[in-house]
Image: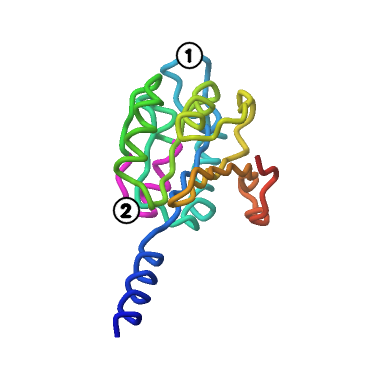
Amino acid sequence: MLRTLLLSLTLSAALLAQDTVIVLLRHAEKAHKGDTAELSEAGHRRAAGLPPQLAAYRPSALFASNLPRTQQTLAPLSKALGLPVQIYVRGEERALARRLLALHGGERVVVCGHSDTLGTLIEALGHLEPFPEVSGYDRFWVLRIREGTASVTLEEHRQAPVGGHPPPPAPVRAR
């Protein structure tokens, strides 16, 4: 009897423990240079194509920086999932990492940031390998934090071509 109870408790704890999965992407194409830039027409098309690909991760929360282009990038996903986009201040990625780990551990979250801030966020989340500055708009990264371990993995994926079919789910590069 006691053995059955202990086995049940162990299995229940294992089922409740889940990896934290954070999907990270750069905002879509912007209309011009500068902090206040909004998305270009191509950027809006790219953003409109993201929901099928990113919804597959079943996020429970969406985060975008306080600049318009990141919020516009996640707007179609927000609408498709019925989730609000939560805003963080660009430059405060370390605080965002602490918030994600404290409030969304064991969940799946999407974060839209900037080419020069994603590396800081990824490092603050525990992935210590160097992360190069992002130059394009066609990739996203999936960071997995194994529950109960110090294991953090990062996979790079290609986004579906604008107006095209989603690429296969295999990662481009695992780090």
Left or right, 154 with respect to 19, comes to right
109 drawn magenta? no
User: Which residue is located at x 65 percent, y 45 percent?
Assistant: 161
Q: Which mark is residue 82?
A: 2
Q: Which residues are magenta?
A: 73-85
Residue at disc 2, secondary structure = loop
Q: Secondary structure at mark 1?
A: loop
- The residue labelled by disc 1 is 34
Please state which of residues 4 and 27 is positioned toward the viewer in this rendering. Answer: 4
Q: What's the residue type where badge 1 is placed?
A: Gly
Which labelled disc corresponds to residue 131? none
Total residue callouts? 2
Check the picture and name the quadrant holding the N terminus. Answer: bottom left
Question: Residue farthest to the front?
Answer: 2
Task: Tell me the quarter of the image containing the C terminus.
Answer: top right
What residue is shown at x 52% (from left), y 15% (from top)?
33
Q: Residue at point 45% right, 37% down?
A: 73
